[in-house]
Image (spheres, grey):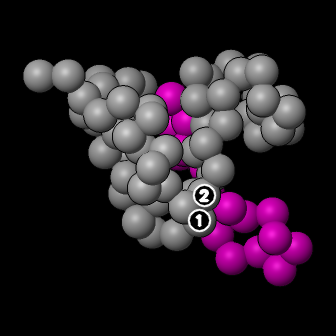
Amino acid sequence: MPGQSIQELRIAFRGELIEPGDAAYESARGMIDKRPKDIARCADVADVMAAVQFGRENDLLTAIRGGGHNGAGLGPVTVAW
């Protein structure tokens, strides 16, 4: 059974979904020399759950980066496939 498509995820996602070629892609992927297929900047817990479920349903290696509570706003949760 095929997993959810990125377009279906995009409909319910409140945060930002970033793909290669998007203006925010290079800064979103950070300083590590990896080039994920998609990057999800999650706005809330529901986004994190949806992004992780998307990775699971599509059998994608998923990486999660979170910075905790950061006064400078440098700690958003990011999920990448």
Specify the label residue 15 is tagged with: 2
Specify the label residue 10 is tagged with: none
* Magenta-colored span: 62-81
Residue 29, horizontal then vertical, whole percent: 74, 34
Identified by mark 2, the residue type is Gly
Q: Secondary structure at mark 2?
A: loop
Q: Are marks 2 and 1 in contact (CB under 8 Å)?
A: yes
Residue found at the very far left of the displayed protein: 1
Residue 7, horizontal then vertical, whole percent: 45, 35
Which is more toward the observer, 45 or 65? 45
Which is more toward the observer, 9 or 35? 9
Alpha carbons under labels 2 and 1: distance apart: 4 Å
Identified by mark 1, the residue type is Ala
Left-right relation of 70 to 65: right
Residue 55, horizontal then vertical, whole percent: 36, 34
Q: Secondary structure at mark 1?
A: loop
Specify the label residue 43 is tagged with: 1
In the depicted structure, whether residue 60 falls above or below residue 65: above
